[in-house]
Amino acid sequence: MTKKLVIEVNEEFFKNLKKQKAQIIEILSSDSISSEKTSELEGVLNFFDYIQDQAVDELGFEKKLVFNLESENEQSS
């Protein structure tokens, strides 16, 4: 059975997604977790990538809004 989940996305959604994605990338680059957990987090990153691709390709969001990771200064504010 296939079902569809609809979520509303906006600028705030992508701001939060980019912060979360940056944190996952930081964790993965630290080598402080097991390979099993690394695989799971990479799966989350793939899901985030899919959402971002759909936002640009299907919904017409600007690439800069969707893809650019937050700078360190923006993350701390």
Image (cartoon, helix red, strand yellow):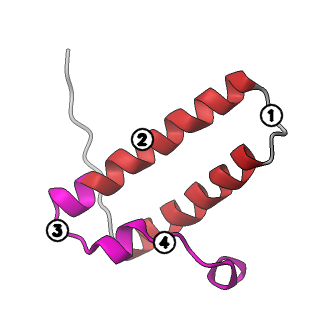
Q: Name the image quarter holding residue 9.
A: bottom left
Point out residue 62 in the picture as x, y percentages from the top left corner: 26, 75
User: In this figure, which residue is indicated by the disc labeled 2?
Assistant: 47
Spatial distance from mark 4 to mark 3, Cα to Cα?
Answer: 16 Å
Q: Which residues are magenta?
A: 54-77
Residue 60 is tagged as 3
What residue is disc 4 on? 15
Contact between marks 4 and 3 (CB within 8 A): the answer is: no
- Residue furthest to the top in view is 1
Q: Earlier in the sequence, mark 1 or mark 3?
A: 1
Query: Is the N terminus in the top left, top right, bottom left or bottom right quadrant?
Result: top left
Residue for point 72% across, 80% down: 76
Inspect the image, locate mark 3, and give the three-letter code of the amino acid beneath it: Gly
Q: Is residue 48 above or below residue 2?
A: below
Element type at mark 2: helix
- Residue 38 lies left or right of residue 10; in this view the side is right
Labels 3 and 2: the sequence-earlier one: 2
Above or below: residue 28 compared with residue 37: below
Label 1 sits on residue: 33
Residue 17 in the image, given as x and y percentages of width and height: 49, 60
Mark found first going from the N terminus, 2 or 1 = 1
Residue drawn 29% across the image and 60% down it: 8
Within 10 Å of disc 3 (Cα), the crowding (few <14, some 14-19, many 20+) is: few
Q: Marks 1/3: CA distance?
A: 36 Å
Mark nearer the N terminus (2 vs 4): 4
Separation of disc 2 and disc 1 at Cα?
20 Å
Disc 4 secondary structure class? helix
Disc 3 secondary structure class = loop
- Seen in the image, is 70 located left or right of residue 9? right
Q: Earlier in the sequence, mark 4 or mark 1?
A: 4
